[in-house]
Image: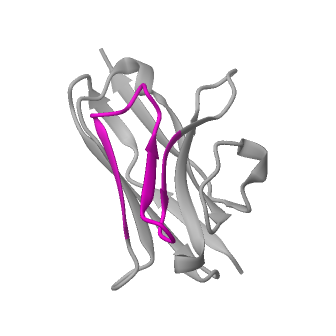
Amino acid sequence: EVQLQASGGGLVQAGGSLRLSCAVSGITFDDYAMSWIRQVPGKEREVVSCTSKSDGSTYYAHSVKGRFTISSDSYTENEVFLQMNSLKPEDTAVHYCAAHVIFYTLHISEYDYWGLGTLVTVSS
């Protein structure tokens, strides 16, 4: 059974930091690119950040570039992280981790596996 378990969300003041984690099981972790995708209620999902282990490439949405950092750990635990600094109220959303085979994609419909989201709330 494939499981992507996201955690680390919470309530933080603007300017603060949070670190999201996504524990992955049931797939060969190194065969998948991992992404963080967020959704504000009533709006479409947005790809925030991606990492492809196959070629080491990463992606950041313009809105988070310079503030967020994606990383992964396949040596001790199959996990992907999103360090979020300088948080803004507009970062408030449910954040999901998702997997796509080999390379990352910016097309939401192409993701192979999704986890349940973790809510990030940034107060002003």
In the rendered image, the vertical position of residue 9 relative to residue 112, given as above or below: above
- Residue 32, horizontal then vertical, whole percent: 59, 70
Q: Say which quadrant the N terminus sits in.
A: bottom right
- Residue 80 belongs to magenta span: no
Question: Is 72 displayed left or right of 100 in the figure?
Answer: left
In the rendered image, the vertical position of residue 36 relative to residue 47, given as above or below: below
Q: Say which quadrant the C terminus sits in.
A: top left
In the rendered image, the vertical position of residue 64 relative to residue 58, given as above or below: above
| Number of marks in the rendered image | 0
Which span is picked out in magenta? 48-72
Question: Residue at left 61%, top 61%?
Answer: 103
- Residue 86, horizontal then vertical, whole percent: 23, 29
The extreme right residue here reads 109
Question: Residue at left 64%, top 50%?
Answer: 105
* Image quarter of residue 7: bottom left
Question: Is 91 displayed left or right of 106 in the figure?
Answer: left
Question: Is 115 displayed left or right of 69 in the figure?
Answer: right
Question: Residue at left 50%, top 58%?
Answer: 6
* Image quarter of residue 17: top left
